[in-house]
Amino acid sequence: MNLATMIELARPRSRTDRRRLLLLVTTIAVAGGFLLAAWRVKRLGFNGELTSMNYSNFLQEDGLRSGVAFAAVLVSICACLLTYQALRLGTAARDRRLAAFRLAGATPGDVRKLGAIDAGMAGLAGGVMAGPVYLLLALLVQGLPRMGRMLPPPNLVDLLTWPVVAVLLTVVAASLGALLGRGVVPNGEKPDGTVRAPVPVKLGIILAALGLGSILITHLISFDVNNSYAVAYLVLALHGLGVILLSAGLPSLLVSWRGRRLTESADPLKVLAGGRLLRTARPVGRTMMLLTFCSVAVGYVAATVATLLFDEDPGSSLSFQLTGLGFAAGLASFTGLIAVVSLLAGTADDLLDQRRQLTSLNVLGVGEAQLHRSVRHQVTSSTAPAIAVGLLLGFVMFASFGSVVHGGYGSPLLLSAVVVVAVGAGLAWLAAAAAAYLLRGQVHEATAAENLRST
């Protein structure tokens, strides 16, 4: 089969396919833009253009400058993870095309090629858009005060690097597409027809237990931070490992718990929401894991800011510290926003995949407005608790490490934790409800009468 035919088969035809392609291109463009930004920051010290009058203090030292570049790379990695999540979204129309492709005599290799071309086209478009994303990011940063200018203006080297990044993103996306295009397997179903466990609860329990144990072990280590830097780094590493394991294990437990609670509700709409949440627990759990990681970063930043503000003598570097903390929280929030977009795309895809069942419910008396309420329960029931848990873990990480190194913090930190977690969970619920409102078009399409046609 020639390349032109494969491109024609990979071309998106339905509205959901186009939304999926848009999500892919957006995440790849964000990843490429931040890769260009990281390379720009990293090579800043090579050409003698570094002056304290032009750029932030974070760019004046090699260690801090490398940290800024590494933060940009981390954001790019998060965007790549969301690209992987978007590639796993399979619309019903796309599944039918692949099934027809296999019935027509296509080999598994042809399906992998089709997946590679599908993802490669998105990677190429995202790589091309990475340049404008980087340019926009650089222009926005130049408008900030000097302490916040952590990204220099673009130059000729960026223009030469842009095509290299575009080719790299295209190759990576095509490789992932080939890896995931091995066949037509519905979500949650194994190739032999059996159904996977809705969520890896046992693995979540193990990861959470190991994370909690790592944090508790640090409280058994006694040392003087002024004389035992190696032990201090060990404590920090154990705390970081513990929070990472907790953040990886708790979301799957949370999704399973919320899904089962909804299915046990007396409200039929919540029962429907719980069933869909359990059926899509794996992709939802991955998104909630990323949201939890982002919330941990925001919670840790909030705890640090609260300690600085309550400190009677914060020192002359307060603006320096607040600028760095603000950027860290902003990047984490931005990554979390992309994760929410991925969650919405997955929910919309699931609605259209189940449109025959939803249309049948509509015929039996469950109206479109009621189904939309069920979707709102589905989205808000997992998002708000995940963000609340992440914020709380961020405060726990800060306070736990401080209790080992500095002897702990007082009630102001506890009060700050209560306020930040409550406000963050409330804002997350409102944002999730507003996001669910955007799915009303998908609900209307999923309950249309023509979905009951047999052909």
Image: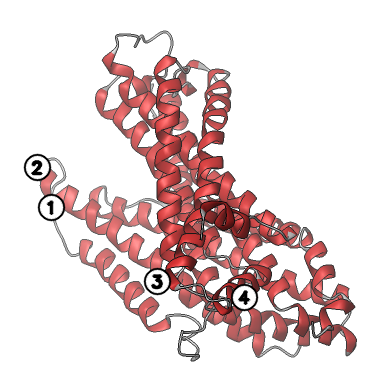
Q: Residues within 10 Å of mark 1 (few under 14, many from 20)?
A: some
The Cα atoms of the two marked residues, 2 and 1, are separated by 8 Å
Left or right of 152? Residue 220 is left
Percent position (x, y) of residue 48? 29, 9
Query: How far apart are the alpha carbons under marks 4 and 2?
Result: 69 Å
Helix, strand or loop at mark 2: loop
Residue 39, picture quadrant: top left
Dot 3 or dot 2: first in sequence order is 2
Residue depicted at 34% across the width and 37% down the height: 70
Mark 4 belongs to which amino acid? Ala
Q: Nearer the viewer, residue 151 or 98?
A: 98
Between tags 4 and 2, which lies in front? Answer: 4
Q: Nearer the viewer, residue 112 or 255?
A: 112
Above or below: residue 203 compared with residue 168: below
- The residue wearing badge 4 is 100
Q: Which residue is mark 3?
A: 249
Q: Name the residue rendered at 52%, 29% in the picture.
A: 131
- 243 sits to left or right of 180: left
Which of marks 2 and 4 precedes in the sequence? 4
Q: Secondary structure at mark 1?
A: loop
Q: Number of callouts in the render? A: 4
Cβ atoms at labels 2 and 1 below 8 Å apart: yes
Q: Amino acid at mark 1?
A: Phe
Query: Residue at left 70%, top 86%?
Result: 271
Q: Which residue is mark 2?
A: 227
Question: Given contact means CB atoms under 8 Å apart, are the residues at marks 1 and 3 in contact?
Answer: no
CA–CA distance in space, label 3 to label 2: 35 Å
Q: Which label was assigned to residue 223?
A: 1
